[in-house]
Each structure stands twice: as C-alpha cells, then as structure tokens.
Image: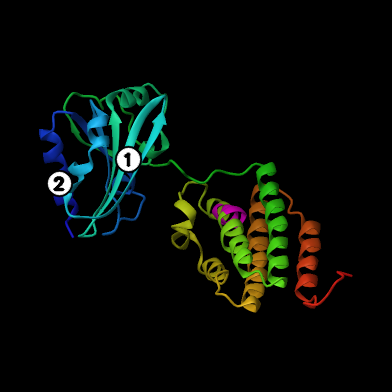
C-alpha cells in the first residue's frame, strides 16, 4: 500500500500539470486532528476545476492513480450548481474519494458566513494556482459535535423507542425473525438507541466531541461498563436469544435516558416505560397457540 506522502505527491503532481484543475483541497479525517487515522482511512480531495464535464464523462483519468478494484460515482446539486463524486478503491488498498467542483461552487462557499460542516471538520489546501482558496475561513474542527437535545427531542426519542420495541415483541412471538431483526438491529439501534448513546457521550464530554457516523467511535468514548452493555445488544438468529437481547436493549436505553434526563433537568417518563415493559413480558410469556391476549 502506498504511503500518504506518495498518494498526495502523486495527486499534487498530476493536478499541477492539468490545466483544468485550479485547486485541490484535502478534506475529512486526514485533515482532522481529532479523528483517528489508519491505513484504511480515505483520501478525500476536492478538485476545483473549470470544466467538470471533462472529468464526469470519461473516468479513465481515475486509472492514473492505480489499478481499480471497484468504484462508485454520483452527482449532486449545491447552490444550484452541479458537482460530482468518484469514489475509488484501488488494488493496493488505497481509497480515494474524489469530489469534482466547478470553480463557481467554491466561490459560493466563500460567500457563506460559516464553513460547511465537512470543511469545518478539517481541510488542507494542497494546490491553489489562482488564489481561489484565500478567503476560506480556518476550520474549527468542531463540526458534527453532539448537540444538547431540547426537552421535546429528548421525550420524542423515548416515545419512539418504547413504541418501536412493541413491534420486536410481536415479531418474535410470530417467529418473524427477519422483521424482528430489522426493527431491533436497524430501526431501533440506529435511531433512538444511537441518539441516546450519543447524548450520553455528549453529557460526559461537555458536548464537545464527534462520535462518528452510526456509532463509529462509540467504543472510543464510552466507559467500559456502557460499552460492554452495548455489545450485549447484538445477537444471532435464535428467537430466544433475541428476546434476551430485546430486554438488554431496553435496560441499557432506560439507564442512559434517565442519566441524560437528570443531567439536562428533564423528567424521564417512568410510567410509559413500566406500561410497555409489562406489555413486552406479557407477549413473551404468551403461548404460540393463544387466540386472546388476556
């Protein structure tokens, strides 16, 4: 695998010789001092060009950076201006996520009172032939930090959690594993549970850290007990194991929500918790041949 210095030097040399490329800005984790970086960390260069269509219509230029294992491309519109991405994984393990911007898009960003979050997270100008980036504000490296929830947001996530767990219980009773796993491992985990874990981390870190997308750095910020309990919310395909995991999930959510609420001065809805918890137990103990819930 190529070293960072080799990848960046190759990029700078190529862009320097290419007349259409006027600036190159490196973004994301490799420019954020708060982010962990390892050999699999992406390179995220923004190519600021005078003609985006040249790069969008013919992708053969991507092969200049190595033998391509796989790639993905997309296009976006920001401030009414079209721009492109070319995400490329090379055979040697290097992954480069190219963003292709017209000069006009950078000019629009320069007019904003604040940097967009992905630049505020961190950036480094690798090349600027025309001084286009001189007006960019310095990054604060604080974008995506966890925000304190309002009382309404806090109670809303709790309401959502205790509503969604009822679907898990019914699906497990019906032996509908696929849907039960979707609700428990996707809908609940990456919505209300993830949000409550983030708020717990925020509370413990003065609301000044970024836990990464979808809990990427949860282990880094959680205390040993909480991480251990969170690990136990994962399980396999046995119905009985998923029942156990459901109750471990509700126990963890309850503890974190109560602590977050106390830290923010919000009251946890214990009665809602008790009603739904009783319902979950009742469904679990209901015989498979039952035709009445009473």
| Residue 25 percent across, percent down from the top left | 26, 36
Q: In x, y percent, where is residue 47?
A: 25, 35
Asked whether 45 or 125 is in front, the reply is 45
Q: In which quarter of the image is the C terminus?
A: bottom right
Q: Above or below — where is 29 with respect to 179?
A: above
Q: In which quarter of the image is residue 98?
A: top left
Left or right of 258, for residue 49: left
Task: Look at the picture and state if 123 lies above or below 259.
Answer: above
Position of 180 relative to 204 (above/below): below
**x, y percent for residue 281:** 77, 71
Which residue corresponds to mark 2? 64
The disc, 2 or 1, on the residue closer to the chain's N-terminal end is 2
Residue 237 is left or right of residue 209, and the answer is: right
Residue 85 is labelled as 1
In which image quadrant can residue 230 be found? bottom right
Magenta includes 192?
yes
* Residue 243 picture quarter: bottom right
Q: Give the range drawn in magenta.
A: 191-198
């Amino acid at each position: 695998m190529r070293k960072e210095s080799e990848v960046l030097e190759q990029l700078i040399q190529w862009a320097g010789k290419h007349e259409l490329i006027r600036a190159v800005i490196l973004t994301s984790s490799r420019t954020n001092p708060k982010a962990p970086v390892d050999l699999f960390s992406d390179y995220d260069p923004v190519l600021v060009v005078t003609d985006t269509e040249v790069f969008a219509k013919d992708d053969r230029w991507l092969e200049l950076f190595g033998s391509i294992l796989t790639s993905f491309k997309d296009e976006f519109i920001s401030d009414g201006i079209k721009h492109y991405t070319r995400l490329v994984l090379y055979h040697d393990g290097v992954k480069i996520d190219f963003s292709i911007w017209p000069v006009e898009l950078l000019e629009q960003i320069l007019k904003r009172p604040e940097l967009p979050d992905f630049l505020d997270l961190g950036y480094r100008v690798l090349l600027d032939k025309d001084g286009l980036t001189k007006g960019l504000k310095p990054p604060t490296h604080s974008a995506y930090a966890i925000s304190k929830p309002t009382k309404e947001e806090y109670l809303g996530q709790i309401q959502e959690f205790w509503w969604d767990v009822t679907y898990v219980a019914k699906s497990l009773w019906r032996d509908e594993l696929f849907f039960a796993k979707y609700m428990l491992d996707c809908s609940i985990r990456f919505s209300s549970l993830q949000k409550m874990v983030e708020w717990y981390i925020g509370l413990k870190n003065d609301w000044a850290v970024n836990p990464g997308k979808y809990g990427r750095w949860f282990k880094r910020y959680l205390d040993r007990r909480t991480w251990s309990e969170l690990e136990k919310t994962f399980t396999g395909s046995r119905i009985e194991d998923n029942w156990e995991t459901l109750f471990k999930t509700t126990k963890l959510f309850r503890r974190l929500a109560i602590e977050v609420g106390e830290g923010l001065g919000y009251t946890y809805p214990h009665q809602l918790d008790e009603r739904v918890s009783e319902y979950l137990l009742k469904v679990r103990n209901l015989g498979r041949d039952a035709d009445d819930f009473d």
